[in-house]
Amino acid sequence: MSNKDDLVFYSSENGDDWILIGGVGQGKIVRHRPNTSSGGSSQDVDINDFLTREGNTPQGQALRKALHAA
């Protein structure tokens, strides 16, 4: 389920999406939505945990850029 304020801040070449739930102003949760062929289910993580774990990955850098652009 998505909200009009949710922000897809990164989509990988293999079809995975990373979404800031609630958008830049209210977002506290990052949702990783894997591509359909992987069969995985979406996972939510606290934004601070995500930035700690994924800070130097393309998706981590994309989130930092989105947050700084706001």
Image (spheres, rainbow, N blue to C red):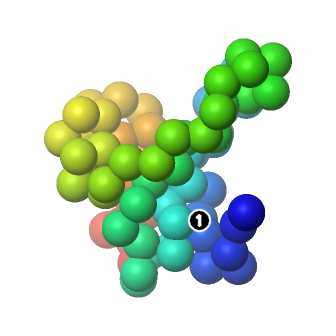
Q: Is residue 61 visible?
A: no
19 shown above or below 37: below
Tell me if I can see residue 6 in this picture: yes
Residue 66 vs residue 35, the one in the foreground: 35
Q: Which residue is mark 1?
A: 7
Q: Residue at x 60, y 69 (%)?
A: 6
Where is residue 54? Give x, y as percent.
30, 34
Residue found 52% across the figure and 66% down from its top: 21
Q: Quadrant of residue 11?
A: top right
Secondary structure found at label 1? strand
Q: Position of residue 55 (x, y in %)?
A: 25, 38
- Residue 57 as seen in the image, left or right of residue 9: left
Direction right: furthest residue = 37
Q: Residue at x 44, y 53 (%)?
A: 30
Q: Position of residue 52 (x, y in %)?
A: 18, 41
Amino acid type, callout 1: Leu
In the displayed structure, 3 sits above or below 51; it is: below
6 or 68: which is nearer to us? 6
- Where in the figure is residue 28, as x and y percent of width and height? 35, 67
**Quadrant location of the C terminus in the rendered image:** bottom left
Quadrant assignment for the N terminus = bottom right
Up-down: is 41 above or below 45? above
Dot 1: few (<14), some (14–19), or many (≥20) neighbours within 10 Å?
some
Q: Is residue 63 left or right of residue 41?
A: left
> In this view, which residue lies farthest toward the bottom?
25
Q: How many marks?
A: 1
User: In the depicted view, which residue is nearer to us: 46 or 51?
Assistant: 46
**Above-or-below relation of 20 to 61:** below
Q: Residue at x 31, y 56 (%)?
A: 47
